[in-house]
Image (cartoon, rainbow, N blue to C red):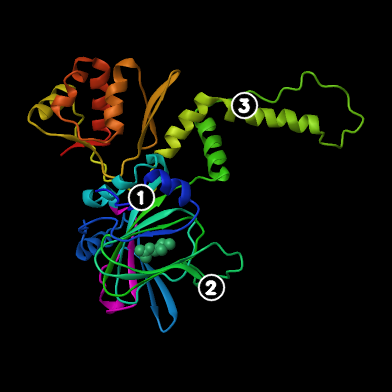
Amino acid sequence: MQIQFNDLTPELFLEKYWQKQPLIIKNAFKDFTDPIDANELAGLAMEEFIESRIVSSHNDRWDVKHGPFEDFSEFGDANWTLLVQAVNNWFAGVNQLIEPFTFIPNWRIDDVMVSFSTPGGGVGPHLDQYDVFIIQGEGKRRWRVGNPDASLQQLLPHEDLKQVSEFEAVIDEITEPGDLLYIPPNHPHDGVAIDHSVNYSVGFQAPNPQELISGLADYLIDNQLLEDRFDDSQRKTTSAPNILADDDVTLLQQVMHSAINDKHILQDFLGKQMTQVHHTLNLLVPTEELTWPVIESIFSEGETLQPVLGLKCLLINENDHQAMYANGEAFALDEDTLALAQKLTSKHPLTSDDLESSSDCLKNTQLLTSLINKGLWTFE
Ligand code: SIN
Ligand code: CO
């Protein structure tokens, strides 16, 4: 699946629109067919380990109910939306919707949320902190998007529903199957279904300094790193002991910088942090540990090895640091395992042909055996 960008290219899109202004591309995906139907989505919303909610509005009264749901009949025929998070972790066709956006690196992408709306359904005008591409599947929806506006009022029509006051729209369009809407962070938007409508939201993640610094602190503690204490062996006497002097602040700042300036620490921390998932994965851990001869025989039967749906994995390939990260874990690499890790992290299915050179090397077979036994890569 490819985006029909018309006169744009991915480069121009990043330059002109990404994180700057919203965009609608009509017919971005020709002959779009929904990779999931309303019944399948409702089935997911019945599961305890899947995050889902129903937002409804009747006579201007907003309500939010959280899944798992047993029955949808109480919601009636109109004015509600079912939203299910990380559907790409469960449906391969939904996971494939990420592919057209891989001109942006994988670590930025979070998940694909799917919504099913009845006529009039929507979550009301609101802001999101993250970029999102919304693909229109089945049905039609009226989408309005505005520019950031500090005068918008924050509203809380229900304790679980943040909205904003009415905004001036710079995009006001009816989306049809295959249309694509891009909304940058903090741009007010509102989608109201015209008929039964399915929307796919490819959402991004953008860590803030709070998350990065607290994550780094946890990482240092877990790995017992940089435990050396503050050193002021060159101290001179002070006549103002009540002052926190600028020189001391600089020394303390250097202590903090020592963690951030250590590239190896930072790469390892970020590799782990950025491959952590925010929603349950369908990890298929073998009931009994598989040994390499067993794995090899499965390959020789023609089976292909695939990453579990929604798996986050990355490669760091610098001269002085080569490692693969998957689901928050590091796997050390070297010259011998790098080619295999390239294939694995590009997420292409692996067949016995791909393994021909790899399987001669013990380190490669150990890497694969470990990934398979953790349930991160599985046979189809
Ligand atoms: C949706 O209703 O499909 C998306 C909701 C949103 O705008 O975040
Ligand atoms: Co939104």
Which residue is pictured at 27% across the width and 31% down the height?
344
Mark 3 lies on a secondary structure that is helix
The residue stretch that appears in magenta = 69-87
Disc 2 from disc 1: Cα separation: 28 Å
Disc 1 from disc 3: Cα separation: 33 Å
Q: Residue furthest bottom?
A: 59
| Amino acid type shown at disc 1 | Asp
**Magenta includes 77?**
yes
**Magenta includes 214?**
no
Label 3 neighbourhood size at 10 Å, few (<14), some (14-19), many (20+)?
few
Q: Is the residue 43 above or below the residue 314 in the image?
A: below
Which residue is pictured at 51% across the width and 33% down the height?
219
| Amino acid type shown at disc 3 | Ser
Quarter of the figure with residue 52: bottom left
Q: Position of 205 compared to 1: left or right?
A: right
Regarding residue 126, the answer to whether it shows in the image is yes
Residue named by callout 3? 258
Foreground: 293 or 110?
A: 110
Q: Position of residue 71 (x, y in %)?
A: 25, 71
Q: Position of residue 339 (x, y in %)?
A: 28, 22
Q: Nearer the viewer, mark 2 or mark 3?
A: 2
